[in-house]
Amino acid sequence: MNPLEERARAIQAHGNLPRHVAVIMDGNGRWAERRGQPRIFGHRAGMKSVRAVIEAAGDLGIEALTLYAFSKENWKRPPAEVDALMGLLRRYMKSEREELIERGARIEAIGDLDQLGGAARAELDRLIEATAHCDRLRVTLALSYGGRAEIVEAARRIARAAVAGNLDPQSLDEPAFARFLYSPDLPDPDLLVRTSGEMRISNFLLWQIAYAELYVTETLWPDFGREAFFEAIEDYQSRERRFGRVMA
Ligand code: IPE
Ligand code: IPE
Ligand code: MG
């Protein structure tokens, strides 16, 4: 067994695996700039990290992985970067399809998906359909995603249901509210990973991360691979989650 396989075994033997890991994949631009290259060079390099993390999560037996790939605010970047990112996303979704099916990865998406261009949207729909039967790992891509927008959209759906007489406002509690979010059947993330050292949430899963463990690494996203992912999981396994209580 090589050292990484041994590490994977030890993580599994520990038992306390996060069910759901969410990742803010940050630092592609800086990775490229440090090499005197255009930002898109970093985005391209980041694709192999996506593959590595999906593989590592599947191998460990983690149930769900949510990847922040493009925020609602990212539309405000220069059009050339946005176009290049959309092109990369499209190509990724097409070229990785067979591999994802083989790995048993079921792809889903959250965000304002209507904002995606027609070609990217079509490729996404194709990928979602092609992997719908896969049941090893649930991979949710956050695309054109904003946490506040998700909450506002939930409020809108709730208001509509109430006006239509299908929902009694008095019955609305936290679980009932959460059922109106984009992915009501995903458990909340246990672990939120952010690469490239930034200590912020950047409008990601605001509702769902109420009690997530936060892990920030200086490693830039294109340098983040299987080993770095294992490190994040090991760190999580050393934490004591209290959920506001006092431990005995
Ligand atoms: C993350 O890398 C990828 C996206 C946000 C799409 P960045 O592009 O934000 O890279 P930095 O943070 O500028 O280095
Ligand atoms: C968050 O990264 C969004 C994604 C990783 C897709 P950003 O680079 O857009 O966030 P800020 O601007 O540093 O907060
Ligand atoms: Mg960034």
Image (cartoon, rainbow, N blue to C red):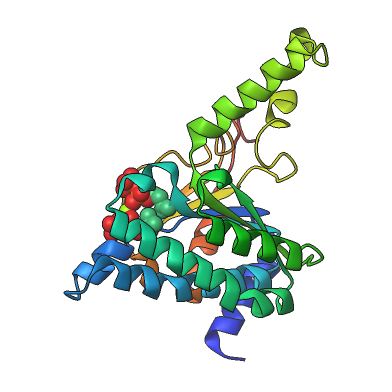
Residue at the image point whose x is 27% and y is 69% from the top: 31
Judge by depth and name the residue closer to the eye, 74 or 52: 74
Q: Position of residue 127 (x, y in %)?
A: 67, 65
Q: How many marks?
A: 0
State which quarter of the image contains the N terminus.
bottom right
Image x and y of residue 211, in percent: 57, 37
Taking depth in this image into account, of 173 and 100 the one nearest to the observer is 100
- From what the image shows, is residue 168 above or below residue 223? above
Q: What residue sits 59% from the left and 28% below the top? A: 153
Residue 30 percent across, percent down from the top left:
25, 63
Identity of the residue furthest to the bottom in this view: 1
Quadrant containing the C terminus in the rendered view? top right
Q: Where's residue 236, x and y in %?
A: 54, 55
Q: Quadrant of residue 203?
A: top left
Query: In front: 169, or 38?
Result: 38
| For residue 77, side relative to residue 24 (left or right) | left
Q: Residue at x 54, y 61 (%)?
A: 119
Residue 151 higher or lower than 111, as above or below: above
For the point 71% across and 59% down, the residue is 63
Whether residue 131 is visible to the viewer of this picture, yes or no, is: no
| Residue 134 found in image quarter | bottom right
Would you say 248 lies left or right of 143 here? right
